[in-house]
Amino acid sequence: MTPLRKRMIEDLQLLNRSPKTIKCYVGHVMRFARHFGCSPERLGPEEARQYQLHLLERKVGWSSFNQSVCALRFLYGTTLGRVDFIPRLTYGRRPKKLPVVLDRQEVLELLSCVCCRNHRMILTTMYATGMRIGEAVELGVRDIDSRRMTILVARGKGNKQRLVPMSPVLLEELRTWWQEHRNPRWLFPGAKPDRPLNVASPQRACKFAVGCAGLNKAATPHSLRHTFATELLEAGVDLLTIQKILGHACIKTTMLYTHVRRDHLQRAGRVLDLLPLRELLGELAESERTSAGRRRKSAK
């Protein structure tokens, strides 16, 4: 480990950044340095600009693009103290897309096409609790509180903890699942019993199940989280409560689901039925016929 990388890691640790964030930031800085074949200490704003153009040429996602900006801003602004460097590192504007939401029949079809019980239980837990996939795979046995009917998300995004409600049906399923493997620590153990399952496995299983079920939506494991949030909103749960359950830092993120509420969209469709569209179209057709008749007379 180079002295610069060690110092950057220590700076991140001093700010209590999560191990995942540290790994992500260090990885982006490593790729930046590898691209130019030298230490970031010897690189400047122009090289950073070239690297950003390189990322665009590779067509990386905007999330990954902006993560690299965060990593480089931290490196130069905090670790190297080159504050003048930061304004030259600009974020990319992410396209605003509505979340993919499944109806209950689509969720059933998707889950029924997941052959591995381990993967199916993880995806079911995500659908029933709104957890992120990284949070679900790292659930510990002790995180389940059957008395209070809650689940502790101990390793949430941003190294934050939160409680999510748990239904009796999910509790029963989780108990049955745990009795099959009886791992003393992890609810979803990986190939090595002392480690949780890697997120890549259920992600691949979900992708295969989407194709197998013939869904015409670009559904991912995260779509189950979106579906959970939308169903809570449609059931009348207030936005602030949903924000706390999902672990959103900003209420604006939660408000995104108001745009995909099916009951609102259907209600809007019923309101459109009240518009005098038939009468209006009839009048337009009559006006068009009258105008056509006048044109024929003037032509004669």
Image (cartoon, helix red, strand yellow):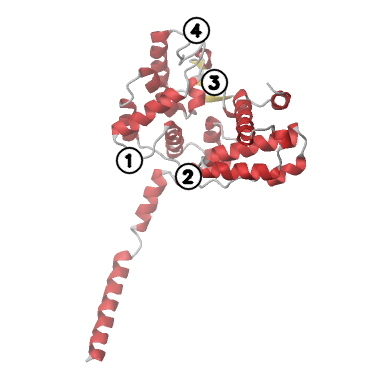
Residue drawn 62% across the image and 35% down it: 32
Q: Is residue 192 above or below residue 198?
A: above
Residue 86 lies, in percent from the top left, at 71, 42
Query: Which badge, 3 or 4, is on the more N-terminal residue?
Result: 3
Query: Which badge, 1 or 4, is on the more N-terminal residue?
Result: 4
Closer mark to the observer between disc 1 and disc 3 = 1
In contact (CB < 8 Å): disc 3 and disc 2: no
Q: Spatial distance from mark 3 to mark 4, Cα to Cα?
A: 17 Å
- The disc labelled 1 sits on which kind of residue? Asn
Closer mark to the observer between disc 1 and disc 4 = 1
- The disc labelled 2 sits on which kind of residue? Thr
Q: Spatial distance from mark 2 to mark 4, Cα to Cα?
A: 41 Å
**Crowdedness of circle 4 by 10 Å Cα count: few (<14), some, many (20+)?**
few
Closer mark to the observer between disc 2 and disc 4 = 4
Please give the residue where the numbered disc 4 appears in the rendered image.
184
Mark 1, secondary structure of its residue = loop
Q: Which corner quadrant of the image does residue 56 belong to?
A: top right
Q: Which corner quadrant of the image does residue 173 belong to?
A: top left
Residue 99 lies, in percent from the top left, at 45, 41
Which numbered marker is on residue 258?
2
Please give the residue where the numbered disc 1 appears in the rendered image.
216
Q: Is residue 197 left or right of residue 15?
A: left
Mark 4, secondary structure of its residue = loop
Picture quarter with the C terminus: bottom left
Towards the viewer: 32 or 104:
32
Which numbered marker is on residue 152?
3
Query: Which badge, 2 or 1, is on the more N-terminal residue?
Result: 1
